[in-house]
Image (cartoon, helix red, strand yellow):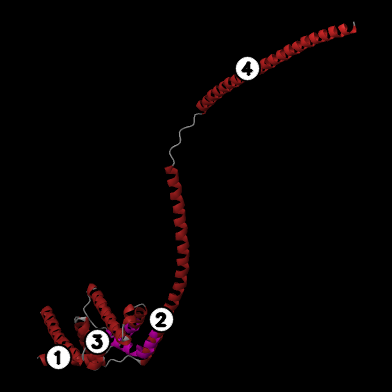
Amino acid sequence: MRDRHKELLELLDKSGAGIYTLLARLTLREDVAEELIQELFLKLSNSRGFEKSNCREAYARKVAINLAFDWRRKIRKKLDSQEYAYEVVTNDGSPLSKIIKSEELEEMLNTLEQLNENSRQIIILRYIEQQSYEDIAEQTGKTTHQVRALCSKALTRLRDLMRTDNKNISAKET
Amino acid sequence: MNNDKENQIRFRLKVISQIEPKEQAITSAIEKTKDVLAKSQKQKDDNVVRTSGAFICGQILKYAIAAVILIGVGFIAGRLAIPAQPEINMEEIQTMMDKKCADNAEKILAASSTLMDKRMYEMVNVIEAARQKDRQWTAAAFDKVVTDNDRMGKSIIALASRTN
């Protein structure tokens, strides 16, 4: 138990900043990222999967991605139930372009949420974390070729999903 | 059209990838996470001590309960295994005992009188035998006296004849 604690502290020192940044990118909120990183490490301290995994850092990143998207799902449900329109609130009176940009990012992340877990992980590692195909292959236990193929498929799926979402929005507006 | 969409996706993903939280926020988040982990670890250690104490107490309690149950079950089984005892009627027992004592006394009496008779009979026989023997001795003594008298007479006669 002590070993696990020590290992987690080492992981936090080594990859804590990276994981926090990833969480901030996926939630677009620093306060939420701070909460989620705490939740993540508590989860890891009791996780058998973490103990068994060959690459602890990759496992931690995978759990972080899932936590971030769980949070997104939860917050959207909450907003839906309160009948709020999906909007980005800015307290500092940001310019319109910034708001539009934020909305676009939210839309992107919401579309990402609709992918399956593997595709989502690969897209995030490749395009948000900017990792090489080789690194992703090592982390996910797949070959580079498989990762490239999955990446390409996931992009196509994302494109389709975005198109469907836009059509739905247009239909609602008319 | 497809390429435009794909470029748009790539662009948005790139924008997301360029989001960098403030250094201060990162440090603060890491420190807070370390605190949370330390607290959790402390709680786990406390729980281990508490759980092991509770485990030992639990074990002792379990054995104690098991022992009480076993004793109880044994007692009940023992009680049920014994056939039901008839109700004791003291008067009946008293009557029975009185009757038994009377019978025994009669038997003892009868037995003792029989024995007495036997002893008396034997004594009479012994006395009779002694008497018989006594008579025989007396008869023998008389015979001897008679014989001795005869002899004495004859001796006196012989003596007298010689002295003449």
Q: Secondary structure at mark 3?
A: loop
Disc 3 versus disc 4: nearer the observer? 4
Q: Do pointers 3 and 2 mark residues of a single chain?
A: no
Asked if residue B19 is positioned above or below residue A118 in the image, the reply reads below
Please provide the residue range marked out in magenta. A7-35
Instruction: Say which residue label 2 marks.
Output: B37
Query: What is the chain identity of the residue bearing mark 2?
Result: B
Q: Which mark is residue A141?
A: 3
The one nearer the camera, B156 or B118, is B156
Instruction: Say which residue label 4 marks.
Output: B121
Left or right relative to A66: residue B52: right
The one nearer the camera, B63 or A50, is B63
Query: What is the chain identity of the residue bearing mark 4?
Result: B
Instruction: Give the Cα distance between marks 2 and 4.
Output: 119 Å
Q: Is residue B79 visible?
A: yes
Instruction: Give the Cα distance between marks 3 and 1.
Output: 27 Å
Q: Are marks 3 and 2 in contact (CB under 8 Å)?
A: no
Asked if residue B128 is positioned above or below residue B7 in the image, the reply reads above
Q: Secondary structure at mark 1?
A: helix
Q: Position of residue A164 (x, y in %)?
A: 12, 82
Q: Position of residue A171 (x, y in %)?
A: 10, 79
Instruction: Give the Cα distance between marks 1 and 4.
Output: 148 Å
